[in-house]
Image (cartoon, grey):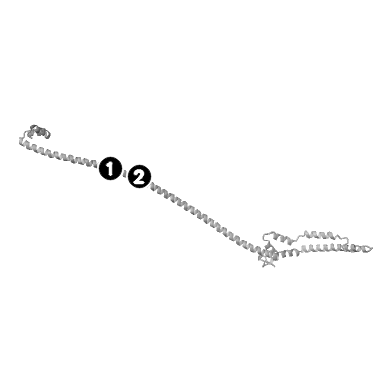
């Protein structure tokens, strides 16, 4: 520290020109003391500055580390946000798919319910039709049973009474009785005349004189022609009762009509056979 050049170098960088000039006027002892104090203070300041630099460097390292951590965290955050966005997108897509599936399920369920309801309606309609058919068949069977009973009774009445009534009505008709009487009379006269002439033919060969039919009541009468006329009249005979019977027989309920025709006082009581004469 006794080298003046070294002191000048030290003082040149320590104080201002004013302070340097002032220091030159101070005694060596005081100057050394002040210089020592200044060096100690400068050393302290330098140490403080170095410590500050060290602290600053450490803080810069910490800042760099924090920035790296922040960048890493930001990248992690961005990745998390991207993952979250993808997850949200997937969740939205999944929810949309679930909603679509639910909609399809609801639609399918409604369609199935509508189809089932239609099938139920059709089944009920078919069952109603079937019940109606069964009822109609039951009614038809009952009707057939009733018809069978009536047909059986009608046939029994026809066998026991109807045919007899028809025959008696024809035979007892005045027109028929008159025509039969006329035809029988003509037949009797024609037979009598034929027998009389046959008798003459058989007797005349035994007598010289011939017998004739002049004394006969049929002399000059064409009994054969009269008989033919009577037969034609009988064959063309019109009997009102027979016409009424024919009209009855042409109807579907001919037995009822015949029963009413032959039993007018018991009309409306049926033809089971218990109301016949």
SS at badge 1? helix
Residue shown at 47% from the left, 52% from the top: 112
Q: CA distance from mark 2 to mark 1?
A: 20 Å
Q: Is residue 163 visible?
A: yes
> Which residue is tagged 2?
86
N-terminal of the pair, mark 2 or mark 1, is 1
- Vertical side of 72 occupied by 149: above or below: below
SS at badge 2? helix
> Which residue is tagged 1?
72
Q: Position of residue 273 (x, y in %)?
A: 67, 66
- Vertical side of 23 occupied by 135: above or below: below
Q: Position of residue 172 (x, y in %)?
A: 75, 65
Q: Position of residue 58 (x, y in %)?
A: 20, 41
Which picture quadrant has residue 173? Answer: bottom right
Quadrant of the drawing holding the C terminus: bottom right
Quadrant of the drawing holding the N terminus: top left
Residue shown at 45% from the left, 50% from the top: 108
Horizontal side of residue 192 vs 76, given as left or right? right
Which class describes the residues within 10 Å of circle 2: few (<14), some (14-19), or many (20+)?
Answer: few
Residue shown at 54% from the left, 56% from the top: 126
Q: Which mark is residue 57?
A: none
């Amino acid at each position: 520290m006794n080298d003046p050049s070294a002191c000048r170098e030290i003082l040149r960088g320590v104080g201002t020109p004013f302070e340097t000039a002032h220091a030159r006027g101070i005694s060596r002892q005081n100057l050394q003391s002040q210089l020592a104090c200044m060096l100690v203070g400068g050393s302290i300041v330098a140490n403080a500055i170095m410590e500050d630099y060290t602290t600053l460097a450490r803080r810069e390292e910490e800042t760099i580390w924090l920035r790296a951590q922040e960048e890493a965290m930001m990248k992690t955050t961005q990745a998390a946000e991207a993952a979250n966005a993808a997850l949200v997108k997937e969740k939205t897509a999944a929810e949309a798919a679930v909603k679509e599936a639910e909609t399809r399920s609801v639609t399918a369920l409604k369609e199935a319910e509508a189809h089932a309801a239609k099938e139920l309606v059709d089944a009920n309609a078919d069952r109603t039709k079937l019940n109606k058919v069964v009822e109609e068949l039951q009614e038809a069977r009952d009707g057939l049973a009733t018809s069978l009973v009536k047909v059986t009774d009608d046939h029994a009445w026809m066998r026991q009474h109807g045919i007899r009534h028809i025959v008696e009505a024809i035979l007892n008709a005045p027109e028929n009785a008159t025509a039969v009487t006329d035809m029988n009379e003509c037949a009797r006269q024609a037979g009598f005349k034929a027998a009389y002439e046959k008798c003459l033919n058989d007797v005349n060969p035994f007598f010289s004189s011939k017998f004739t039919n002049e004394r006969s009541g049929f002399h000059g009468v064409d009994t054969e022609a009269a008989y033919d006329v009577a037969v034609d009249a009988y064959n063309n005979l019109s009997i009102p009762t027979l016409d009424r019977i024919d009209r009855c027989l042409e109807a579907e309920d001919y037995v009822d009509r015949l029963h009413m025709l032959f039993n007018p006082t018991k009309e409306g009581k049926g033809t089971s056979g218990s109301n016949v004469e």
